[in-house]
Every structure is written in C-alpha cells, then in structure tokens.
Image: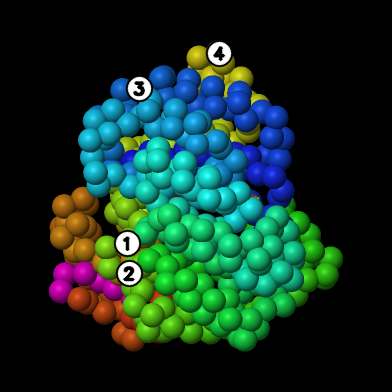
Amino acid sequence: MAGIYFHFPFCRQACHYCNFHFSTQLKHQQTMLKAFEKEISLRNDEIPQRLESIYFGGGSPSLLSPRAIENLLNIVMRDSLHNDKIEITIEVNPDDVSDAYLNQLKSIGVNRISIGIQSFFDHELRMMNRIHSAAQAINAIERTAHYFDNFSIDLIYGVPGSNSTTWKNNLNRALSFDPPHLSSYALTVEPKTVLAHLVKIKQLDLLDEEWVKSQYDWMVDRMEEAGLENYEFSNYSKPGFQSINNSNYWEGKAYIGIGPAAHSFDGYRKRSWNIANNQKYMKSLEQGILPSQHEKLKEHEAFNEYIMTGLRTAKGVSLEKVHQSFGNHYVTYLEQQVENHLIPQRLYWDGDALKVSKGAKFLSDGIASDLFILKD
Ligand code: SF4
C-alpha cells in the first residue's frame, strides 16, 4: 500500500482555469470532516497498518485547522506513527500561510508543504483569478523554507499574456528560494471554466503550442542547470526530494482516496472513485453508504496506462515490469512497435528501460499513444 489521499473540496475563490472538484460554500466544512471520518470507518479494512504517504489535496486543504488535520492523521496513522520515513504533505495557498500555521503543521507531523504559487506577477495572478498576490507568494515561500526542509513550489506556464521574459523571471524567482522540489504545469483550457468562456468570446488569446513547448524546453534545461532532475514530465527535484506520494502513483502502487471526487486504486486493476458532489457525498455517508463506483481495467488498458505514465517519468517503461505485469507477448509487442513505428530521435533504450529523449519530452503523451494497444 502506498498511501492515502484526502480531497478537501472547498476553496475561498474559484480560479478561472480550474476544473478540479471544489465548492466555495465554506459553511459545509465541518459536516464534510464528519463525512470523511465516516468514509474512513466504512473503509477500515482497506487502510493498511503502515502507510508510505498521506497527502492533503483539494480544493484548498490549507483551509483546514491543524487540529482537524491532526484528527484525520490520528485516525489513519496506526503503525505509521512509528514510521519515520512516512511523507505527510499538505497543499497550501499562499494567503493561508503564517508562522503560527506552519509551526502547528510541523508539530502535528506534517513534513512536506506544496505551495500553490503559480506566478510571481500580480497581473498573471489576477488573470487566473488566484486569491493571493505576488507579495503573499514570496512571503509564503520564505516562511515555509524557514520551517520545512521539504517543500515544493507550483508554477503555471503558458499563461495568456506571458512571454519568454515573464516566464523566465517566474522560474528564476522560484529557483532563487533554492526549492528542493518544483512542479510546473501548462495552463490548459478545460470545459466549463471561466477561462474557456473568455477564450470563446475572444477576450483572451491562448499562446500557441509551439510557444508553450519552447517555454517547457527552456524550463527543462534551466532546472537541470539548477540541480533539479526532471523526474516526471511536470516535476523536478533535488536528489532525495522526489514526492513519495506522486512517485507511488506513477509506479502504479495502491492508494486510497477519501472525499468527494477522490479516486482509489488497488495496485492491480481495480479503480474506484467517489461521487463529485459535496451534498450527495455527505448525505450518502450520513446514511452509511459509500458514494463510490468502480471499474476493472482490462489488461490492455492497464498496459496503456503504464506506457503513458512510464514515458512521463525519468525511470521510463521497464521491460521487466511489462514482462511481470502483462507477460512476454506484451514485451514482444512493445519492442516491435518501437522498432517499426517511431522516429528514433524521440525514444531510446537505457538498459531495459524505454525512455523519451530530452528534446521530445513535451510530446511524451503523443508518443505514448503511438504505443497503445487499441481494442474494443
Ligand atoms: S485554489 Fe486550487 S482547487 Fe481551488 S479553485 Fe484554485 S486551482 Fe482550483
């Protein structure tokens, strides 16, 4: 068992690009916490004695008080209380960060902070409708670095109105804090978001794909120069600071998702997900019913998923793992596909691992789809 993920589905304000599940109806937070407890008790048998990671995401889990977080930790930790190596992460919004808050998080055992910075420019933050300012972003990192060795900065690139100067400034500013970990995502237009509406009515022009790719390629080089390895498509870390939670997810280990819209995986083929509706989630748990659905991945679907996530990581796709998980005919298929259909400069073999070449990383998902097995 890899870990537990808590999805805390509340935010003070809706960011224009966001399609995660959340509500701005903050008054339901306490009832939601009760529902979390109920979900944990109903899934008691699934929670192992010893966990590798616990992750508070959302939404905005930094709306939670340290006492509420401690209560959830006490319920799920069990023997993990004695595991020094357990990673306990919370995502925080810069406007929620204070010395007192960080100090309390540390005292209850949180040992990793992921800060949603996104940009150091006020005009970009306003365009995304982030609630915080550039000054709050800087203060949040300074305060966090004072209390925690292990922290991560989140940035967004490809923001409409950005250019190579603003993007370079953003990344260089983030690196000036010497972060052990950084995640950076391209701004994407998701359906039913304000951003999608603004693009539709032509109030915003998106940057073209080539331009976004050039921002990504520059970032990969700049991060390498700063000593942060691109260990997954969007994630960079110093040695020893890779996110355990995320790495386990990419390696296909089991995890339990608690909260509305949270997903779970049994580490083999079964995937389940909770209803993405706060009211229905809380009501169902009040009645003692788990509001979840599940599916069993077919063998070729599990193979395709492994190819997709594997090619996004520095470890690549391991032939040994393909052999163990799917059998030798999948190994033969993969070797033939690589041989027959792909442009050599995009992929290479590193021992038994298939990897995407540096200049082709931005195209990883498209390259992976060339290797998929398609069946009905
Ligand atoms: S704070 Fe995070 S989860 Fe909430 S709306 Fe913004 S991007 Fe989405």
**Residue at mark 3:** 44
**Residue at mark 4:** 287
Circle nearer the viewer, 1 or 4: 1
Q: Which residues are magenta?
A: 351-356
Q: State which tag comes first along the sequence, 2 or 4.
A: 2
Camera-side residue: 211 or 181?
181
Q: Callout 3 environment at 10 Å: few (<14), some (14 to 19), or many (20+)?
A: few
Question: Dividing the picture into quarters, in which one does residue 315 lie?
Answer: bottom left
Q: Amino acid at mark 2?
A: Lys
Q: Position of residue 122 (x, y in %)?
A: 71, 69
Question: Dividing the picture into quarters, in which one does residue 348 lie?
Answer: bottom left
| Point 73% across, 59% down: residue | 129
Q: State which tag comes first along the sequence, 3 or 4.
A: 3
Camera-side residue: 191 or 283?
283
Q: Position of residue 231 (x, y in %)?
A: 34, 68
**Residue at mark 1:** 241
**Residue at mark 2:** 238
Circle nearer the viewer, 2 or 4: 2
In the rendered view, how is the structure colored? Answer: rainbow
Camera-side residue: 58 or 315?
58
